[in-house]
Amino acid sequence: MSSSLAEAPDLICQLDSVQGVVDSLTAVRWKRHQDAVIEISEHGIVLIVEETTCLQAKVYLKRELFVKYEYGAEGRPRFGVSLGLFVDCLNTFCVPSRSNSIEIRYPGPDMQLLLKSIDSSNSCIYADIRTRIPETVSWDYNFEPAGNPLNFTVKSAALKEAIDDLEWPGSSILLTLQPTPPSVIFKGEGHGDLQIDLMYYSNTGLLLAFNCDRLVSHRYKYKFLRATTSNIPSSVIRENRGSKLSIGRGGMLKVQHLFSVARPSLPHPHIDTASYQQPSRIAYIEFFVKPEINEEAANDVN
């Protein structure tokens, strides 16, 4: 076996929309100093962040997002990085009014993550990020439906506004789904009481979808619930896509967002005339929030 084959990188990929990836990673950056685990495979790149085994977020960058994706590793290599450093490095490649294409390689000679701009013949930006062996294995949240689906889809801007408003009571948040009348209720009880009702039939432009065949109610720590929306960039909020919230077995809450990773300044074959982003140009962000289990009111009502 030749040495050139032995030294070949596990991954070489090229991306033509750095800003879309920066937006996606910023959405899961809820602390200034935050570690992340990156997993690469033939299917794409997954970035995972966690806090106290109660909150986990994943950013899925599927291989279809990349204009080039060459994967040569066996298995699924994993490595740790500083999320803040990774985002800041990517930001240096985001130059206004210019094409922002980069090449990413892993590993470098010293196991670094290597970044290089590839859209200019006159200049080139290089960056290398030191990686480390993950100290722990990311917890598998293993989200399972609790019988028939319990979920709703709401405009992202409305969800962020509702969760921001719920900071005032200074308490954990009780999330209730009820089939009659079909509605979603957020309630905080602390320094004061605040309740936000989203009625399905009267707010079809706001509450886009609703599936619930029984009353269910669970309580979540506010800081973890807030992390699911607090860092979504304003540019993404303006797009106002729908965010989907699902309640699984044991009250596990899954929050899903879709971010465009299409190149905004130039036409792209994956974008149709109605500006609908094809699945290949979408980054998927998922949050998993464990419920507080400390009183009977925070359980399914059968």
Image (cartoon, helix red, strand yellow):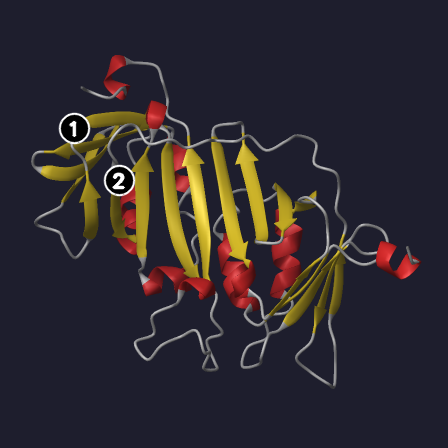
- Amino acid type at mark 2: Asn
Question: Residue 151 shows which numbered tag?
Answer: 2
Give SS at disc 2.
Answer: strand
Q: Give the Cα separation between the discs numbered 1 and 2.
A: 12 Å
Nearest the viewer among 257 and 31 is 257
State which quarter of the image contains the C terminus: top left
The quarter of the picture where the N terminus appears is bottom right
- For the point 22% across and 27% down, the residue is 216
Residue neighbourhood size for the residue with mark 2, other residues' Cα within 10 Å, grouped as few (<14), some (14–19), many (≥20) = many
Q: Amino acid at mark 1?
A: Arg
Q: How many marks on residues?
A: 2
The quadrant in which residue 8 appears is bottom right
Residue placed under numbered mark 1 in the picture? 214
Q: Residue at x 29, y 14 (%)?
A: 295
Residue 90 at x, y percent in the picture: 63, 62
Instruction: Report which quarter residue 113 is drawn in.
Output: bottom right
Label 1 sits on a secondary structure element that is loop
Residue 242, horizontal then vertical, whole percent: 30, 55
Q: Is residue 50 left or right of residue 217?
A: right
Q: Position of residue 17 (x, y in %)?
A: 54, 70
State which tag comes first along the sequence, 1 or 2.
2
Residue 160: tell me if it is visible: no
Expressed as whole percent of the image width and height from the top left, the position of residue 259 reads 42, 59
Taking 153 as reference, is 249 left or right?
right
| Front in this rendered view, residue 139 or 42 | 42
Q: Is residue 149 found left or right of 46 in the rendered image?
A: left
